[in-house]
Amino acid sequence: MDVFTASILLILILLPLLGFYFRQSWLKPPLPPSPSSGLPLIGHLHLLGKLPHQSFQALAEKHGPIFSLRFGFRHAVVISSTDLAKEVLRVHDATFASRPSNVGLDIGFYKYFMGGAPYGDLWKQLRRLYSVELLTSKRIDSFLPLRLEELSLMLSGLARAHERNEAVDMRNLLTCFTFNTITRILMNKRYFQHQGEELHGIDSSEASVFKAILVELSETALQFRISALLPSYLRWIDWSVYWIRRLHAKQDQFLQKIIDEHKNEKNTSTSSKDIMDMMLGLLAEDPRGEDIVKAAMTELVSGGTDTSATVIEWALAEILHRAPRVLDKAHDELDAVVGRSRMVDEADLPRLPYLQAIIKENFRLHPPAPLLVPHMPTHESNLAGYRVLGGTTTFVNVYAIGRDPALWDEPLEFRPERFLGSSMDVKGQDFELLPFGSGRRACPGMGLGLRTVQLALANLIHGFHWSAAEENALEEAGGAVIWVKTPLKAMASPRLPVEVLAWS
Ligand code: HEM
C-alpha cells in the first residue's frame, strides 16, 4: 500500500473517532466556572489563604454559587447556595458520599477512619457501629451522671477563680471540660485539671502526647500538603508522612496501654462500661478489632472535643463582646423557667426557646467546620447544568450560606431573635443552617455534641454574671475547627449560691 492510500485510510478510521470525541464533549455540559488566575503546577492553591472558607466566600461573590478550582492534579468544586447544598447532600447524596483520600489520615487512623473512609462497605460497617451501638440517644443518656459531674467541676472552677478575682481563659477551661467529658465516656480516663482543681490522679504527660497526636492529625486532615497536589501513585514523596508515622508509633503505644488496662480490669471490675469496653466486646471475634477500637478512640476524641468547645467559646464571645443585651434576656428566661435555686438540667432545655435561639444563631455565624468535611462524587455528575467529574473534592461552604444576605436580614449581626417562632433547626433538614452537614455523611455525634453544648451554655449563663476581661476583635483562626483568634478571657461572678453551682 502506498503512502497516499495509507494516509486516506488512517483519516477514514480517525474521523469517526474524532467526531465521536468532539460530539461527546460538545454535548456534555460545561465544567463549573473557574478563576482565570490558576498557575502552572499548583493551580489555584495560592488563592486559598489561611481561612479557605473566607477565600471561597469571596470567590463565590465573583464566580457564583458553584465554581471549580484546581490544586495540582486534583480538581475541586465549591458550593455556596442552599439549592446546590441540597443537590449535593440530598438529591445526589449517594453519589457525593465519598471522601478524597489522605495518606496521613490513613496512618493516624489505622485505615479505619470512618470520617475519611471512601463510601463503601468499610464505611457502612463503621457507621453502623457508631450510630447503632455507640452514639445512640440511650447511650448518651446513660452517661448523663458523668457529663454532669464534669460540668459541675467546670462551674466550681469558675467560682474559685472568682474568689481569687481572676479572669478565666475560657478556651482552656472549655477544652479541658470537653476533653475530660469525652475521654471519660470513651475510656473512663480523665486527663486535665480545671483551673484551681487539684492535680490528684491526673496523668497529664500521657494526655499531652495524645493531644499532640490529635492536633497533628487534624492539621494533616486540613492542610493542603504536598501529597494533595500529586497523583496518588506519587504520594510517597510527601515527607510529612514520615513524621506522622513517628507520632503514630507513640499513639499506638498510648492506646494499647489503655486497651490492656481495660482487658485486665474486665474480669475484676463491676464498674459501668465505657465505650471502649463495649467495642472490645462487640469486636472480640474480629481480627481487626483492636485497630478499629484505636481508630475509633482517636476519631471520637478528635471529632468530639474542639467542635463543642469552640461553639461554646464563640457564643460567650459574641454575647460578651457584641451583644450583651442577649445575656439579660437569657437570664430572664432561665429565672422564669428554672429559678435560682437549682441548675439547668436536660429536661429544661426544650422549655428554653431563647437559649436554643442563641445556639442556632451561633451555629449560623460560626459553624465549627465551615466547609463540612470534603465530599467526593464516586462518578461524574451534573450540578446546576455543570459537569462535576468523579473524584472531585467537593466543599459545601456552610459558612457562606449562613452569612448570605439573600437569606438573612443583617447577616453579620448576632441576633438570636431571628429564630424565635421559626421552626428552622440545625439537624440537617434546613439547608440554610447546616453545622452538622446533612444526609448519609452527616455528623453521627450530633446528639452528643448538641446536648453537651446546650447544657453547658445554659448552665454557664444561668450560674454566672459575665464580663469580658479584655478587648477582643473576634477574628477567626483556622485549625481543625475555627477558633476565636484571641482566646476569650472573661470574669465570671456567681449568680446562684455556690452550693447550687456544685450540684452533682
Ligand atoms: C458541636 C459539635 C459538632 C459539630 C458542629 C460537628 C460537625 C460535623 C460535621 C460538619 C461533619 C461532616 C459532615 C459532612 O461531611 O457532611 C462531622 C462529621 C463527623 N463527626 Fe461531628 N460534629 C460535632 C460533634 C461531634 C461529636 C461529639 C462526635 C463524636 C463523639 C463527632 C463525630 C463525627 C464523625 C465520626 C464524623 C464523620 C462522619 C462520616 O464521615 O460519616 N462529631 N461532624
Image (tube, rainbow, N blue to C red):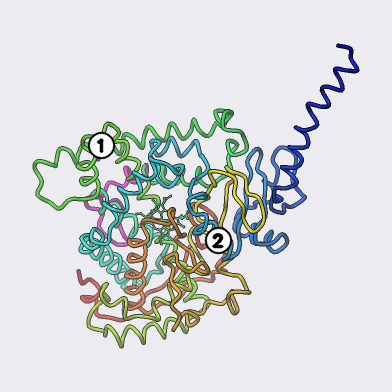
The answer to whether residue 173 is seen in the rendering is no
Q: Residue at x 26, y 54 (%)?
A: 185
Left or right placement of residue 277 versus residue 67 in this view: left
Q: Quadrant of residue 230?
A: top right
Q: Secondary structure at mark 2?
A: helix
**What residue appears at the point 31 percent right and 42 percent down from the top-left corner?**
206
Q: Position of residue 144 (x, y in %)?
A: 23, 64
Q: Which residues are magenta?
A: 188-209
The secondary structure that most of the magenta stretch takes on is: loop
Callout 2 amino acid:
Ala
Q: Residue at x 48, y 64 (%)?
A: 434
Residue 193 included in the magenta stretch of the image? yes
Position of 285 with respect to 66 (left or right) is: left
Q: Amino acid at mark 1?
A: Lys
Q: Residues within 10 Å of mark 2 (few under 14, many from 20)?
A: many
**Of the pair 154 and 287, the residue shown nearer to us:** 287
At mark 1, the secondary structure is helix
Residue 96 in the magenta stretch? The answer is: no
Q: Earlier in the sequence, mark 2 or mark 1?
A: 2
Ligand 1: which quarter? bottom left
Which of the numbered marks, if any, corresponds to residue 257?
Answer: 1
Instruction: In the rendered view, tell whether residue 100 sits above or below residue 240.
Output: below
The residue sitting at the right extreme is: 4
Report the side of 232 relative to 46 (left or right). Answer: left
Residue at the disc numbered 2: 85
The picture places residue 334, in percent across and down from the top left corner, at 33, 83
Q: Which mark is residue 483?
A: none
State the image coordinates of residue 2 (x, y, percent, origin top left): 89, 12
Where is residue 40 shown, x and y percent of the image? 75, 39
Q: Tags 2 and 1 in contact by the CB under 8 Å rule?
A: no
* Foreground disc of the pair 2, 1: 2
Q: How many marks?
A: 2
